[in-house]
Image (cartoon, rainbow, N blue to C red):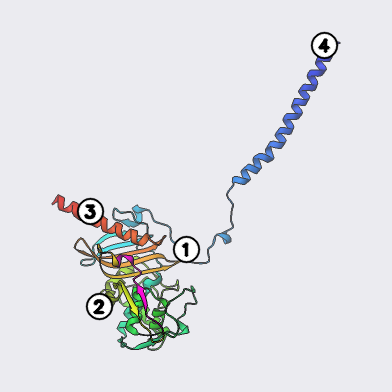
């Protein structure tokens, strides 16, 4: 009798253990599935992944599209010797991309080629207000400035309304002006560049680092462009408003360690932070192109890295000679 009782108890325990193991297994599966779902990356359709604006190019591998033992943060960069065209550094120089306010260098050249009086007064109108990016401006509608002052603000402070007024007041109007910009680009060998407005706010202003080196080299031949683009600050006195001080958008202009002969900055979201310069480093006249920097200080940091790199190389060369 006792043996029968013990056997019944063992059977009950084993069945209970089996039942518990099945229930636990049934409950564990949803828990594991939930954990997996919680850590799984969301998936998107191809349409959801498409951005409505220009997409930045991927950074190329140093082996395939970079020349020069230097690491820069800008997506595209170019450093050449202005005297002989020697290539010192190159990174993605053929990538076609928006150039933002670097466009204003072409604007200035076309204005100066047009031989319009620089002392002629031009009014800022509602047509010069930015309806693309809706950027603000201290140059109010109704302001009256000379054409020279508009050039000063457009190149030194990257003033968009000043650039727009320059294009709008060109003989034939803004459409003829844009045609002249593109014709000028072709005439100096900028075959991969197109221009769509005078200010650079339109992302259809496109170029490459290689083409921009040509533009900077050509612009350097204009005395007015060299002068106004490297002025540290300028006070404008309009007919209707109190004097306003503008500063150069390139912080390196005020840096005593730099000898800069031409400068232009640029930024819109599609183009990133850009900087083009003519500068003398270690007794060499150079053209420097920096495009699509991620942060506001990327272009300044890259420019300083280029300067230190060249100075170090020259010091090493002197030691070896």
Mark 4–mark 1 Cα distance, whole angstroms, equals: 81 Å
Q: Position of residue 9 (x, y in %)?
A: 81, 18
Residue pictured at 69% horizontal, 40% vertical: 30
Mark 4–mark 2 Cα distance, whole angstroms, equals: 114 Å
Q: What residue is pinned by disc 2?
A: 223
Of the image marks 2 and 3, the number of the one nearer the N terminus: 2
Q: Nearer the viewer, mark 4 or mark 2?
A: 2
Q: Quadrant of residue 246?
A: bottom left
Q: What residue is pinned by disc 4?
A: 3
* Labelled disc at residue 203: none
Q: Quadrant of the N terminus?
A: top right
Q: What residue is pinned by disc 1?
A: 55
Q: Is residue 150 left or right of residue 16?
A: left
Q: What residue is pinned by disc 3?
A: 312
- Say what secondary structure mark 2 lies in: helix
Of the image marks 4 and 1, the number of the one nearer the N terminus: 4
- Say what secondary structure mark 1 lies in: loop
Task: Pick the residue in front: 239 or 114.
Answer: 239
CB contact under 8 Å: marks 2 and 1: no
Mark 2–mark 3 Cα distance, whole angstroms, equals: 32 Å
Mark 3–mark 1 Cα distance, whole angstroms, equals: 36 Å
């Amino acid at each position: 009798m006792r043996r029968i009782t013990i056997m019944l108890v063992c059977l009950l325990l084993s069945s209970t253990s089996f039942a518990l193991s099945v229930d636990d297994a049934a409950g564990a599966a949803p828990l594991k599935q939930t954990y997996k779902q919680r850590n799984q990356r969301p998936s998107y359709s191809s349409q959801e992944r498409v951005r409505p604006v220009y997409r930045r190019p991927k950074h190329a591998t140093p082996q395939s599209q970079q020349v020069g033992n230097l690491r820069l943060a800008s997506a595209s960069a170019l450093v050449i010797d202005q005297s002989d065209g020697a290539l010192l550094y190159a990174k993605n120089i053929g990538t076609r991309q928006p150039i933002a306010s670097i466009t204003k260098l072409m604007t200035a050249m076309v204005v100066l080629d047009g031989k319009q009086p620089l002392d002629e007064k031009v009014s800022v109108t509602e047509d010069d207000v930015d309806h693309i990016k809706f950027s603000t401006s201290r140059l109010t509608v109704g302001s009256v400035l000379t054409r020279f002052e508009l050039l000063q603000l457009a190149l030194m402070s990257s003033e968009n309304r000043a650039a727009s007024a320059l294009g709008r007041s060109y003989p034939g109007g803004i459409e003829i002006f844009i045609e002249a910009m593109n014709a000028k680009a072709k005439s100096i060998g900028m075959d991969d560049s197109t221009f769509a407005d005078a200010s650079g706010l339109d992302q259809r202003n496109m170029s490459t680092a290689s083409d921009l080196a040509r533009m900077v080299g050509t612009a350097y031949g204009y005395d007015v462009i060299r002068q106004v683009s490297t002025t540290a600050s300028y006070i404008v006195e309009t007919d209707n408003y109190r004097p306003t001080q503008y500063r150069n958008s390139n912080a390196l202009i005020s840096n005593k360690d730099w000898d800069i002969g031409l400068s232009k900055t640029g930024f819109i979201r599609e183009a990133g932070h850009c900087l083009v310069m003519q500068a003398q480093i270690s007794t060499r006249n150079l053209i420097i192109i920096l495009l699509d920097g991620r942060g506001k200080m990327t272009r300044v940091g890259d420019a300083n890295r280029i300067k230190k790199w060249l100075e170090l190389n020259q010091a090493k060369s002197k030691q070896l000679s």
